[in-house]
Amino acid sequence: MFGDLMGMMGKLQEAQKKVEETKQRLNTVLIDEQTADGLLKVTVTANRQIRSLELNDELLSDKEQLEDYLILTLNKALEKAGAINEAELAAAAKDGMPNIPGMDLFK
């Protein structure tokens, strides 16, 4: 019985390590998003950190348009990043989880 428990603890530690490694790797996964007219471009990581913003000088003359573009474009990029983040972390956690009867958390 204790052997099974120790084995499960080891697998849980492996799962935690895989999740942490995945989090680090997601810092290097970049998501690019831009407005339809290309006046604003953003890049975020899969960990939802903004890496870069590029905006056309034309947007500097229209504060309201710039604000709208920033909100829409950043939200689209962050939504994509969140989906990638969740899928990758769930896969990493599922791969490392021990098979505990009745604990089908990732199905």
Image (tube, rainbow, N blue to C red):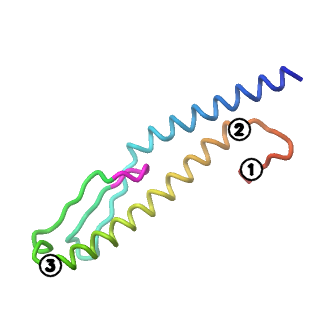
Q: Earlier in the sequence, mark 3 or mark 2?
A: 3
* Residue at mark 1 to residue at mark 2: CA–CA distance: 10 Å
| Total labels drawn | 3
The amino acid beneath tag 2 is: Met
Seen at 86% across and 42% down, the residue is: 101
Q: Position of residue 89 (x, y in %)?
A: 56, 46
Q: Which mark is residue 62?
A: 3
Local crowd size for mark 1, using a 10 Å CA cut-off: few (<14), some (14–19), many (≥20): few
Q: Is residue 48 magenta?
A: yes
The residue that disc 2 covers is 97
The amino acid beneath tag 1 is: Leu
Residue 35 in which image quadrant: bottom left
The residue that disc 1 covers is 105
Q: Earlier in the sequence, mark 1 or mark 3?
A: 3
Q: Which residues are magenta?
A: 44-49
Q: Position of residue 39 (x, y in %)?
A: 20, 71
Q: Are marks 1 and 2 in contact (CB under 8 Å)?
A: yes
Q: Position of residue 15 (x, y in %)?
A: 64, 35
* Residue at mark 1 to residue at mark 3: CA–CA distance: 49 Å
